[in-house]
Amino acid sequence: MDTSRSAPLTPGGRVGGPGADATADVTELYRAHAVGLIRLAIVMLGDRAAAEDVVQDAFLGLYRRWAGLSDPANALTYVRSAVLNRCRNELRQRGRSRSHELAAVAVAGESAEAAVLVGEEHQRVLAAIRALPDRQREALVLRFYLDMSEEEAARAMGISRGTVKSATHRAVAALGRMLKEEP
Amino acid sequence: MTSTEDRARAAMRAIGGTVQGAPPLRLDPAPGESRSAGRWARRTWRRGNSPRMRSWLAPAAAAAVVVTVAVTLVLVRGPQNDGVVPPPALTSFGPGGVPRYYVAVEPGTGKGDSPNGLLAGDTVTGQTIPVKPPPHMSFRSVTAAADDRTFFAFASQAGGTGTTGLWFALVLAPGTQNMVTLASTAIAQQSGVAASALSASGKYLAVAERGPAEGQQRVVVFAVDTGRPLDVWSTKTAPAIWLAESVQQNLLTWIDGDRAIALSGYAAATSQASVRRLSFPLPSGHGDLIADSQLIWSPPASTQLACALSPLVVSVDGTSIACAATSIQVPPTLSGSEQWTTSWRVYQASVRDPASTKYTVAYQVTKQLQANVIAQSQVLWASPSGSAVLGAWATASIPSVSPSPSSGNGPSIGTSTSSGIGTSTAPMVLVSGVLPGAVVHVGVMSHGTFTPLRLPRDILFLPNGGIAW
């Protein structure tokens, strides 16, 4: 039995920092969900290294805020939102030009392997997804990649169900236009 | 042509599938190292130090992948469970978003009581690995979790009725020495089993089975880790809602992850087709199969008749129901050929409008059949959005058609007075399994296009859960 799960989820050990319980719990959470979250991030960013970085940062943020979590059961929701936020920031920093997106996929170490594996058609679609406005892109990824219901996506994004619905609809329409316009 | 939504799903799954592991978690950056500094140092190392280095990394990585694939393909060999190294998972999905790996019941030889085994297969490469049944057992049906790796197979005593038995867990580990692992489960032997379905997470198994009371039918959800029954829906006063000898495939489908079960069936008393939604978990643990479920599809008789010979396949989001609808135009003279048409239809399931007859056609085939030629068709899988289905059809010449009892193994032929739609009044032929010499077509159907897939013909046209993705 993993005793770390049954231990009280309170900070301990060092003053002013997370304790052994937090380390065990966050590590356990990372073991269980890191791969899925890196997959989510690579869908958003197209870059394996950047995806691993945002997930690492998100878990570090969770670890630092562990004591302030009102309910540790919400930790996964928290860290998923953190990954989405960091992906959004990363894309904004990149400037989100399509040529940059395609270049990022093509030149970035392990992403080159990914680019080979996913194929040209998928790369085109992924580049188009990353060119969508933030909300549309996130709604699309949560609904169609994570297969979240509209309610779940609304909770994860902090918006209403209706907004998720319209954002998803617009995302599909915009994506269709972008892909159609390509030569 | 594939829809935008499907293209988006396929692209996201393809790139997501390239991630197979995570680096170790670093919770405490070294003293003096800022988060961002460490992060960027790591990224610089990963990406190479110069534009020149970057420029050859992409082709080098591509070459490495090609070499890996080539080496792996050389290593794939052998028919038995040991010594087989299938190709690693390059992506998690095949053409049209079909999950890459499947497991199917592999019919025995038909001689004596030869048991059914299993066949684990790769939709992308066409590679298969046979799995032998445990001693004195014969596999009857298969169901899959959503991870494309975990399957449960129902097995009963070889030569028995096939409705009393146990479940075995089959786990695929592509790219490893032990590609297939078969293990017993904690769920006790059950009797009167009509169908079973593993939840998306693999934590729950739903079983449609005969209840203890006369004529009673029920759906039980078991916890996979403990084997304990958690929730039970029973027909208390209502009539049975599926036929005892139903040809229905995928009678049970988990939908919306682990949150609900779709139960499809033809009522024994009225032959009324229906699909009901059972929300899980039940507040009290016990419920009525009719009163505590929602009708999401129950179309008019003409629609039911069109799909009567085809299993209904419910998509994993519970919004689409696919079937192969067949019509036959009988010639004016017995010596003429008849026109056989099958369209793979996708209906929309809805609590608000369960009687909806609206559907889209994924693909349609029309053949002129001579008197000694029979045809069959089926749906094997439907995409979450319902815009693509995996379907099959086959035509075969037979010397003569005569009713014969089903032997349980291998192809069997019987007759039905069901007339399908159109003008036919002649008996239709029901075939279980593919007849020797049949010409078989199987592939992804979407928006009128057909993309062939390499699937073994022996695993097609099997009744009741014969294959699972």
Image (cartoon, coloured by chain):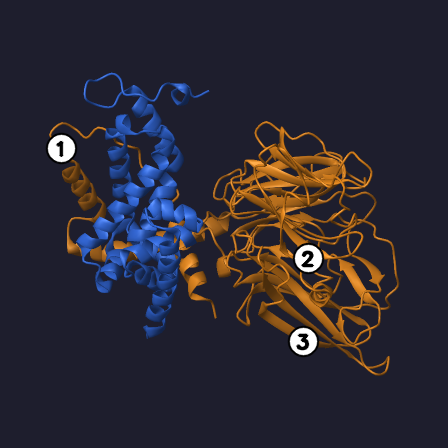
Chain colours: A blue, B orange
Badge 3 element: strand
Which residue is more in the foreground, B177 or B233?
Answer: B233
User: From mark 3 to mark 2, how far is it between C-alphas?
Assistant: 20 Å
Identify whether B256 is placed above or below B184: below
Q: Does B165 sit above or below residue A154?
A: above
10 Å neighbourhood of mark 1: few (<14), some, or many (≥20)? few
Q: Nearer the viewer, mark 3 or mark 2?
A: 2
Question: Residue B70's x, y, as percent?
Answer: 44, 53
Question: Which chain does the numbered disc 3 sit on?
Answer: B
Residue located beneath label 2 in the image: B311
Q: Amino acid at mark 3?
A: Thr
Element under label 2? loop
Check disc 1 and give the amino acid type. Glu
Residue B450 in which image quadrant:
bottom right
Where is residue B246? Give x, y as percent.
Answer: 76, 52
In front: B115, or B468? B468
Q: Is residue A91 above or below residue B440?
A: above
User: Which residue in the structure is indicated by mark 3?
Assistant: B366
Q: CA distance from mark 1 to mark 2?
A: 61 Å
| Foreground: disc 1 or disc 2 | 2
Of A67 and B165, the residue lying toward us:
A67
* Residue at the (31%, 63%) spot, across then down: A128
Question: Which residue occupies the extreme top position in the image?
Answer: A13
What chain is tagged by disc 2?
B
Position of A7 compared to B428: left or right? left
| Residue ID at (35%, 42%) | A37
In the rendered view, does A42 fall on the left or right side of B171?
left
**Disc 2 residue type (three-letter):** Pro
Residue A21 pos. (x, y %):
32, 21
Query: Could you tell me which secondary element the residue under label 1 belongs to?
Result: loop
- Label 1: which residue? B33
